[in-house]
């Protein structure tokens, strides 16, 4: 977003220090001019903020159609920092070892406390963030994706703008037969922040939750999934303005186009269930 030049430079330094072959870098300025960056870093400056998924899609295409010039792409938030110098090598090893592995979700840890927030562990059983496992979704700001996934199932959903775009891609990847791993040993240091800091948080979360279900779930599961999330939202007792925004987004999700509908196969539903997160929660 162009307002964290020092953090961005520190992130790029941590990428440059990775062991093994050099990591080629593209920085996308999403509606803001970019600061001076190290030699060799390619840049793309967009005239307006097109949202997180569309901005990342631009970064993908910078490496050829669907990222085809590379085997694997890393996605890193500009205020993050790779904690270790072997992350790129661990990624290479993981993808080479497991041909079915499509996506790796890194562990996000606070740089001061080392703690990982529960919401940053992409599974229901999140009590132990140091345990790696197969999962059903991933974290957008700290991950690696095999470019064959984009070739087969497409990129992130541009219209989501913010929230749940990772799960949309994850479900499509799982439906195509790919697997997703959460790796606790691949760490991005990132300051602990509440997601509600974004003014659009409640509306986007609700709208995109509806779009996610309408786009990807078999018809009988759509009302079940959304009913569960409505009850969970009410149980969390959001502020009155937050609840109003959430309900407005929920309505918007039903009354606006969600894009192409490609419901997952029932065997994928069973796969998600066996992985610990049936697509009703």
Image (tube, rainbow, N blue to C red):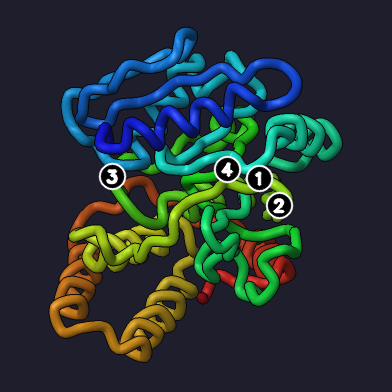
Place residue 195 in its image quadrant.
bottom left
Indicate whether 257 appears above or below 266. above
Give the residue drawn at x 32%, y 59%: 208
**Are discs 4 and 3 less than 8 Å apart at CB?**
no
Indicate whether 90 appears above or below 21. below
> What's the mark number on residue 143?
4
Residue 104 at x, y percent in the picture: 65, 45
| Residue 20 placement, left or right of 11 | right
Q: Quadrant of the N terminus?
A: top left
Local secondary structure at mark 1: strand
Q: Nearer the viewer, residue 212 or 201?
A: 201
**Are discs 1 and 2 less than 8 Å apart at CB?**
yes
> What's the mark number on residue 234?
none
**Are discs 1 and 4 less than 8 Å apart at CB?**
yes
Mark 4 or 3 closer to N-term?
4
Identify the residue under disc 1.
Answer: 104
Q: Nearer the viewer, mark 4 or mark 3?
A: 4
Q: CA distance from mark 4 to mark 3?
A: 21 Å
Q: Within 10 angstroms of label 1, few (less than 14), some, or many (20 or more) residues?
A: many
Mark 1 or 2 closer to N-term?
1
Q: Within 10 angstroms of label 4, few (less than 14), some, or many (20 or more) residues?
A: many
Give the residue drawn at x 26%, y 83%: 238
Local secondary structure at mark 2: strand
| Residue 82 placement, left or right of 245 | right
Give the residue drawn at x 50%, y 14%: 64
Identify the residue under disc 2.
Answer: 183
Mark 1 or 4 closer to N-term?
1
Identify the residue under disc 3.
Answer: 159
Indicate whether 273 appears above or below 163. below
Q: Nearer the viewer, residue 197 or 275?
A: 197
Mark 3 or 1 closer to N-term?
1
Place residue 125 in its image quadrant.
bottom right
């Amino acid at each position: 977003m162009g307002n964290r030049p020092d953090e961005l430079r520190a992130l790029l330094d941590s990428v440059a220090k990775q062991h093994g072959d050099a990591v080629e870098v593209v920085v996308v300025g999403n509606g803001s001019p970019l600061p001076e960056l190290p030699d060799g870093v390619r840049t793309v400056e967009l005239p307006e903020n097109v949202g997180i998924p569309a901005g990342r899609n631009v970064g993908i295409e910078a490496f050829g159609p669907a990222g085809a010039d590379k085997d694997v792409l890393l996605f890193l938030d500009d205020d993050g920092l790779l904690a270790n110098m072997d992350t790129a090598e661990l990624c290479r090893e993981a993808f080479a070892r497991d041909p079915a592995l499509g996506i790796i979700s890194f562990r996000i840890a606070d740089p001061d406390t080392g703690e990982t927030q529960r919401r940053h562990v992409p599974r229901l059983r999140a009590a132990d963030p140091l345990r790696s496992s197969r999962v059903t979704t991933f974290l957008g700001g700290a991950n690696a994706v095999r470019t064959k996934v984009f070739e087969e199932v497409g990129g992130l959903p541009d219209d989501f703008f913010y929230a749940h775009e990772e799960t949309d891609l994850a479900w499509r990847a799982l439906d195509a037969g790919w697997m997703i791993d959460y790796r606790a040993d691949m760490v991005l240091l990132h300051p602990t922040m509440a997601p509600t800091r974004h003014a659009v948080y409640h509306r986007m979360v609700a709208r995109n939750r509806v779009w996610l279900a309408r786009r990807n779930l078999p018809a009988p599961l759509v009302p079940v999934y959304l009913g569960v999330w409505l009850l969970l939202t009410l149980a969390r007792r959001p502020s009155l303005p937050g609840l109003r925004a959430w309900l407005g987004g929920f309505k918007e999700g039903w009354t606006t186009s969600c894009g192409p509908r490609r419901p997952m196969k029932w065997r994928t539903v069973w796969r998600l269930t066996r992985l610990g997160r049936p697509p009703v929660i």
